Image (cartoon, rainbow, N blue to C red):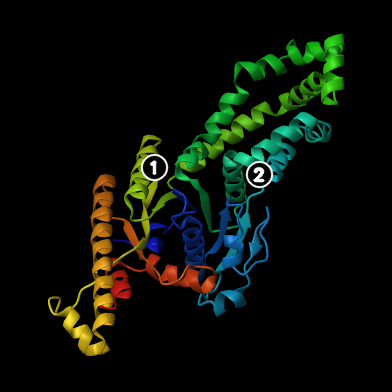
């Protein structure tokens, strides 16, 4: 089975997707750190509002601009990039990303300011900051188009939501080409009629209730936005092209439990239906199979070694529980590989401690960037 490094060889974009609580953010950061250690300039982007990524990289906070992770901190944590290797990180600010998109697509400063200052836009952009899916794709495309990084690693929402994330460019195109939008922005549409006719008594009452002239603001917004429709449509098309580009790689992240395995199968099916490039699966917190030389006499051997019959019984029971978990995990991972029809299933063992710093990311990276035989040896000590 190939390592993550082999899967990502020659790729420019890595998108980590999967259900919640499976270590997706940690995996994304570990992949980015490992690729930086191999001499690439890498940026990891998260849309997770929690501070886990910043904390694990020794940064006080992350924002909408990429920040360089201190090479000294990387080295202290066991990640030492070869020449040219750099690790950068950022956390998406959806509203700021939307604002930047408007600035780029506006035909002139007046149109730009009319949209950015419009109260309807400010409400819409604030709402989008809660969903984030399209803005994540927009930021990914922006960084890719700038060409400042050798590799971009994107951490995504939980998988069912990530399907919205994958469909976001198409939904944007459908919105701007839809009947409602055309009704507002065509020269003789509602926006033009409202703007030209002025507010009626009913609109005056509405204005007193909501505190501002809602219909006039809607008319102003759509009139200003009309000059950006073609630019948004073209941008959405290019984002879709980036997702389907062979240079992009989707890695599905899951746990060994049945529910997360089902999520991984479901997400892989959706990737296949959308004809998006699938790279492999990373299964976190796997209980590797454990073996002992004299299984039948294990408890007796433990009594001899520990000198305490009660303690030996507890250790033997604990080992039996672990073995049952390892057998379950093996069955589930084997089924996952069969369902997906892939040999690229990278198993990361259940570690003694949660990952909360660069050293932890380096430990995860040992398994991600090893071949299968080496992974087994690392996990089992054999």
Q: Circle 2 is placed at which residue position?
A: 94
Identified at 56% across, 70% down, the residue is 84
Residue that mark 1 sits on: 267
| Residue 156 location (% of width, % of height) | 51, 48
Q: Residue at x 60, y 75 (%)?
A: 73
Q: Secondary structure at mark 1?
A: helix
**Where is residue 214, by image quadrant?**
top right
Classify mark 2: residues with Cα within 10 Å, few (<14), some (14-19) or many (20+).
many
Asked where in the image residue 63 lies, by quadrant, the reply is bottom right
Q: Would residue 222 be found to the left or right of residue 284 on screen?
A: right
User: Which part of the image, by quadrant, shows the C terminus?
Assistant: bottom left
Q: Please, which residue is most extreme toward the front here? A: 310
Residue 228 shows in the view: yes
Above or below residue 268? Residue 44 is: below
Question: Of callouts 1 and 2, which one flags the residue occurring earlier in the amino acid sequence?
Answer: 2
Report the Cα–Cα distance between label 1 and label 2: 24 Å
- Looking at the image, residue 306 sits to the left or right of residue 249; the answer is left
Choose between 160 and 301: the one closer to the eye: 301
Secondary structure at badge 2 equals helix
Residue 343: x, y in percent? Answer: 27, 55
């Amino acid at each position: 089975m190939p390592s993550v490094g082999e899967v990502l060889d020659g790729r420019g974009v890595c998108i980590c997707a999967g259900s919640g609580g499976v270590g997706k953010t940690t995996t994304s950061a570990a992949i980015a750190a490992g690729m930086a250690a191999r001499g690439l300039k890498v940026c990891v982007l998260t849309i997770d509002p929690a501070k886990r990524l910043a904390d694990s990289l020794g940064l006080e906070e992350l924002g909408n601009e990429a920040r360089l992770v201190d090479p000294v901190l990387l080295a202290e944590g066991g990640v030492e990039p070869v020449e040219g290797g750099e690790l950068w990180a950022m956390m998406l600010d959806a509203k700021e990303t939307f604002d930047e998109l408007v600035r780029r697509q506006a035909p002139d400063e007046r149109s730009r300011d009319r949209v950015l200052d419009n109260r309807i836009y400010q409400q819409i952009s604030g709402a989008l900051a809660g969903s984030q899916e399209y803005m994540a794709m927009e930021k990914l495309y922006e960084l890719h188009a700038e060409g400042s990084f050798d590799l971009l690693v994107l951490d995504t929402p939980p998988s069912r939501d990530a399907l919205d994330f994958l469909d976001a460019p198409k939904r944007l195109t459908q919105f701007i080409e839809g009947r409602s939008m055309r009704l507002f922005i065509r020269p003789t549409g509602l926006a033009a009629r409202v703007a030209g006719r002025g507010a009626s008594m009913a609109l005056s009452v509405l204005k007193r209730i909501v505190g501002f002239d809602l219909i006039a603001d809607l008319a102003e917004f759509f009139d200003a936005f009309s000059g950006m429709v073609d630019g948004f449509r073209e941008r959405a098309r290019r984002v879709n092209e980036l997702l389907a580009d062979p240079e992009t790689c989707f890695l599905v992240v899951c746990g060994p439990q049945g529910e997360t395995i089902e999520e991984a199968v479901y997400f892989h099916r959706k990737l296949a239906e959308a004809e998006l490039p699938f790279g492999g699966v990373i299964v976190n917190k796997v209980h590797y199979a454990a073996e002992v030389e004299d299984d039948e006499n294990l408890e007796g051997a433990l009594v001899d070694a520990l000198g305490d019959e009660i303690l030996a019984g507890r250790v033997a029971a604990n080992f039996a529980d672990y073995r049952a978990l390892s057998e379950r995990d093996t069955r589930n991972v084997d089924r996952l590989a069969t369902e997906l029809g892939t040999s690229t299933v990278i198993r990361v063992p259940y570690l003694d401690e949660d990952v909360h710093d660069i050293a932890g990311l380096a430990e995860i990276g040992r398994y991600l960037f090893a071949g299968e035989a080496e992974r087994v040896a690392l996990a089992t000590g054999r």
